[in-house]
Image (cartoon, helix red, strand yellow):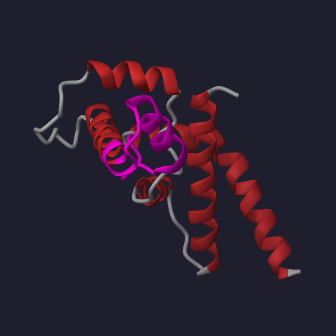
Amino acid sequence: MHIKDIKRNAFVGQAVTALSRAHASGEEIDLDTLVDRVLAQRPPAFFLGLEYACTVLKRLPEPMLEVPDPQQLKICMWRDLQLNVKRTQTLRNCTFRQAVEFVLNYVRPQRWYISHLQGRRMLRNNLKQTRLVISLVKTSQGA
């Protein structure tokens, strides 16, 4: 499975959870509200490969001191990753590669680094399946 598929599945999974919670409380939410709720949560991972992350992080200025514009999601993600790697290297006294590997495997990013539009596309493509899952959950809880 490709990393993009894993990322999409994680996003849709969090959407299913948010949607089932809303339905359990009797709330009907639209797609935009659902996307906003998922984007407000922390994703399970950075969704990057080790080699790619090491290559990009080595090319970034040391350290990335200026706070990037929140609208530049990719830059924000790399800054978040860079700060976590630096912190891990200091705390664990390990090599750069070991720190990157540790962060990718065990540290969750601060937020989803995707736009509202990207999240909407991911959910729209899976909306029928998501509604089917929710209806099955509601049916099983009512039985």
Q: Is residue 123 left or right of residue 93?
A: right
User: Would residue 20 be visible to someone looking at this image?
Assistant: yes
Decide: is 122 above or below 36. Answer: above
Residue 106 included in the magenta stretch of the image: yes
User: Would residue 120 be visible to someone looking at this image?
Assistant: no
Rendered location of residue 58, percent (x, y): 31, 21
- What residue is drawn where x is 44% and y is 61%? 37
Q: Nearest the camera: 97 or 72?
A: 97
- What residue is drawn where x is 50% and y is 59%? 30
Decide: is 75 above or below 22. Answer: above
- What residue is drawn where x is 70% and y is 47%? 128
Specify start and end residues of the magenta stretch as a single range: 88-113
Q: Nearest the camera: 8 or 98?
A: 98
Decide: is 97 above or below 109. Answer: above
| Dominant secondary-structure state across the stretch colored magenta | helix
Is the C terminus in the top left, top right, bottom left or bottom right quadrant?
A: bottom right
Q: Nearest the camera: 56 or 35?
A: 56
Rendered location of residue 42, percent (x, y): 45, 56
Residue extending farthest left: 66
Rendered location of residue 53, percent (x, y): 43, 26
Residue 76 included in the magenta stretch of the image: no
Residue extending farthest right: 143
Q: Is residue 100 left or right of residue 124?
A: left
Rendered location of residue 73, percent (x, y): 30, 37
Q: Is residue 105 left or right of residue 72?
A: right
